[in-house]
Image (cartoon, grey):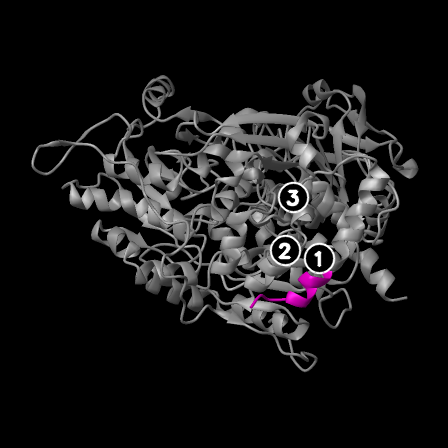
Amino acid sequence: MAFDIDMIKKVYANMTERVDNARAIVGKPLTLSEKILYAHLWDGKPTKAFTRGKDYVDFAPDRVACQDATAQMALLQFMQAGKPKVAVPTTVHCDHLIQAKDGAATDLKHANNTSSEVFNFLESVSNKYGIGFWKPGAGIIHQVVLENYAFPGGMMIGTDSHTVNAGGLGMVAIGVGGADAVDVMAGMAWELKFPKLIGVRLTGKLSGWTAPKDVILKVAEILTVKGGTGAIVEYFGPGALSMSCTGKGTICNMGAEIGATTSTFGYDDSMERYLRATDRADVADEANKIKEYLTADAVVYENPEQYFDQVIDINLSELGPLLNGPFTPDLSTEVGRDMTEKAKANDWPMQVEWGLIGSCTNSSYEDLSRASSIAQQALDKGLKTKAEFGINPGSEQVRYTAERDGILQVFEKLDAKIFTNACGPCIGQWARYSDPKNAPKNSIVHSFNRNFAKRADGNPNTHAFVASPEITAAIAIAGRLDFNPMTDTLINENGEEVMLDEPTGWELPPKGFEVKENGYLEPLEDGSGVKVTVNPDSERLQLLTPFEPIGDTIKGAKLLIKAFGKCTTDHISMAGPWLRFRGHLDNIANNTLIGAVNAFNHKTNFVKNQLTGEYGGVPDTQRDYKKHGIWSVVIGDHNYGEGSSREHAAMQPRHLGVAAVIVKSFARIHETNLKKQGMLGLTFANESDYDLIQEDDTFNFLDLDAFAPDKQLHVEVVHADGSKDVIALNHTYNDTQIKWYKEGSALNLIKKQNAK
């Protein structure tokens, strides 16, 4: 039986009337995305049509999901909101703080020892406030959500950018910062700019070596890492209907890598099969009663150009396996000869040292079974693997079932390391090197979603390529980046030429799923007696102090850093070993922008301190400005804040005294996070003004006292020689968001409202 079945029934009971009402108001047939959005308006029944990409809208999500690294800050903020219990079903999943090194049992024990303070804190807060708690080792948040909580037609937010994975079960599931989650947990409306709509029409059928992963790798090539910004991507067509539910989840998962608000598929037979296989027949039965409301109106998919802002066509029968990377998830290369030419031209290491399968993207039973069919061939055909194997099952249910069915044992016979049911190498929790900064140049292939520099192992010289689990397994066996399993032979132990056959696998386990202990802890019905304590001397946790408003007079602000090129949330607030400080704002602030490249010397963590004239680390320089009561400004390029949902990338600069971030363009989640923390997130009205910024610049904001929606702001930039430039700045703040700024943060406004 499903969690929260009564809530799901209520959603479905409201959906028909609200969708019918919305269709009448909008005056045309609706996409699935629009149906879900209009069915989840904060005010209930729709009363007006919203303009895509322009109107800010208040929504009422059905549930919230948090992973342990982001949950710390989210719950520390929620503790200040003055609420006795969360207002909507909420869960915490401990999956990020488990480092991959020696294997599941050893690594999990080590994590429980080193992070017990954090896990105990999260468990006690969950108990106090009515939050479901998934223990370390229970699984990766998005796989666990797909197995237990996702449902067609629902709306969910989560404090992780890959919350979008739940689109594989027909949800609108959106990654947000912790402050957004606090709004919803506190019973407040959640605000989002009404998204644009991108339709992806899938024709044909996947076969052979091509997998659902290749669909999103192709979409990433087409749209690039920012092409989906501000949009929901809705997949449809006969190709979509032929795919498994977990395959759909894989595609939706990596929608985060194109900047999409989320991605989704219409309810179909594969989703029904998955719901029933994961003990949620009751949800399937309810969904079947309103089937036509859980997908787009038929005419929309028949004439998509009339209803979507952009339409992309992909013929799955013509799609071949792809490798995306290195260093960016949208650089796509066809497996085989194309890779040979590209690798030689770019001096990419051809030898592959590791093949990694898992992460929230590709850790389902189907993924593991198809990859193991390739691994079994290596055993049967006398092949020795040239690269090392690492496997991260998605959940304890997947792991237990895969072990029962002999799938994991196949990998173990090839000396693979079966890591904990956790994120591991995908988010930098991989103890691969003792000194990653000075580690050698190398290539790895993985089925993860991100491949930024230093992302997996901390080594800036690791060239990481994203592929399907099947291709990852084949390339790991061959040990070469340009291996094409469709055409190339391998030499076995007997000196014979052999070829790998096409992968096979199971959409769902033939004997059904099984698990002995899933790792879930139900919260107390009444948690009022639970005491949550934080040691004031802790290095891992720190109670929050509300931010003071920055105000409407910013004069003499110093340039902290002008970031050159790509500046993701990994550059602004690194993961890996820094994850241990995610609950301690002051300690984790010591990694602020240390990965950003200084445009003036092309070095990282090396900026000029205008007070001393000396060069030093970014956090050290900023702390000196803060000590002297001086605000600072960060300058950035396009798609600033791409990547994770981590609000630390906004909270840390705010804590250290950064007043404004001025860039050519923002990634959606990061822009929202800056607003939530009471900062200025601004864009150049003329992108070329980025070039005017010099190393010794001082900033005077001229018209903050007239801060208003749709009205430009202006800043006077004073250069070292006394010359000045006045730069026009755009923003997307609405009235409520300007109140956040004036109050010091969105949380400050919530507390003020709750105190009334």
Please tell me which residue is depicted at 72% across the width and 26% down the height of the picture.
306
Query: Mark 2 — residue?
Result: 287
Q: Circles 2 and 1: CB distance less than 8 Å?
A: yes
Query: Mark 1 — residue?
Result: 12
> In this orientation, which residue lies closer to the viewer: 13 or 472?
13
For marks 2 and 1, the one nearer the N-term is 1
Please tell me which residue is depicted at 63% across the width and 45% down the height of the picture.
649
Name the spot of residue 286 as percent of width and height, x first: 64, 59
Residue extent of the magenta highlight: 1-10
For marks 1 and 3, the one nearer the N-term is 1
Which amino acid type is marked by label 1? Tyr
Q: Secondary structure at mark 3?
A: loop
Q: Residues within 10 Å of mark 1 (few under 14, many from 20)?
A: many
Q: Considering the image in quadrants, where does the C terminus appear?
A: bottom right
Q: Is residue 370 left or right of residue 556?
A: left
For the image shown, how many numbered marks are present on the structure? 3
Query: Mark 3 — residue?
Result: 295
Q: Secondary structure at mark 2?
A: helix
Which amino acid type is marked by label 3? Thr
